Image: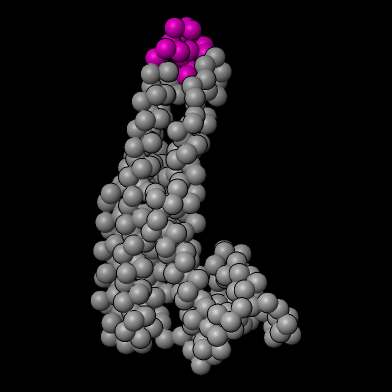
Amino acid sequence: MKRTLRYTLRLHNHVGEITRKYFEFRAPFFEPSEHRDRFSADLHRDYLKELITDRANYADLTPDQRYLHDLGGLVSPILSAYRARIRLSRLSRRTGTINASSRLEDTCQRISLEAYNFKERLKLFGDSLSDILCAKSERKEISARVGSIIRKYEKENGRIIRYRNYVIHGPRGRIDEFADLRTWEISGFLLHNDLWFDYNNEFDEMRETWASLTCRLLAAMEEAVFSIQALNEKLLTEAGLSFSNSASAARVSEATTGS
């Protein structure tokens, strides 16, 4: 897993470093009286847990908190897609039942939703990054760079995202990836048992196709987060981002390091 998701795990560490260096543990998550005597490492973990997860009330976040939330949020759909890829490789054929293809179809739907979710999270991060740029004149350039990352990702995973559109928006003008598999399934169930052999062949083909698509999806996700982190590190090095609580950053960093 570490080899497959090395850039995703590196991004997760990057988010932790940014939090310790630039962020004060502040409302709406903690009041001073709540954490005055707490071990700072525990505080840091809880802060990330509450801020990065989607339980947070997005409207209550400050612009720099939204930036941190959206950067850290890129990790979640990648992990979900990775788990679905493992499940996909372990699926076995079933025959003689009307729901024989359900596990394969459900897994691929999950993958398609995570592929789309990741694209939307890239867009959110691009917007929140632009909001905290020190030089507002750079917004157009930064938006163009993030947009280029998104377009490349979407182009490389067009089939998966189009299937997501079929799942969400319906069949009008869209392709049902599993129509043939379901046809053999119901034919074997209602017409003749020999048709299950055709079903098995179609099942194996679809499983291998989607395993290959998911491998490419994960590679594209890794490439996208690598590019996003490189852009983010460049802006941080050049002091191109404005954090509302930078005055307290040194205290927070010292407290975390000292623990």
Q: Is residue 24 visible?
A: no
Image height of 55 relative to 20, above or below: above
- Of 256 and 30, the residue lying toward us: 256
Question: Could you tell me residue 222's position as x and y percent?
Answer: 36, 55
Q: Which residues are magenta?
A: 184-199
Q: Does the magenta portion include 148?
A: no
Image height of 215 relative to 18, above or below: above
| Image-based side of 30 in relation to 83, left or right | right
Name the residue: 34% across, 33% down: 209
Question: Could you tell me residue 36's position as x and y percent?
Answer: 71, 84
| Image-based side of 22 in relation to 44, left or right | left
Question: Could you tell me residue 119's position as x and y percent?
Answer: 38, 57
Name the residue: 52% across, 78% down: 20
Q: Is residue 129 visible?
A: yes
Image height of 113 relative to 28, above or below: above
- Of 4 and 229, the residue lying toward us: 4
Colour setting: one colour
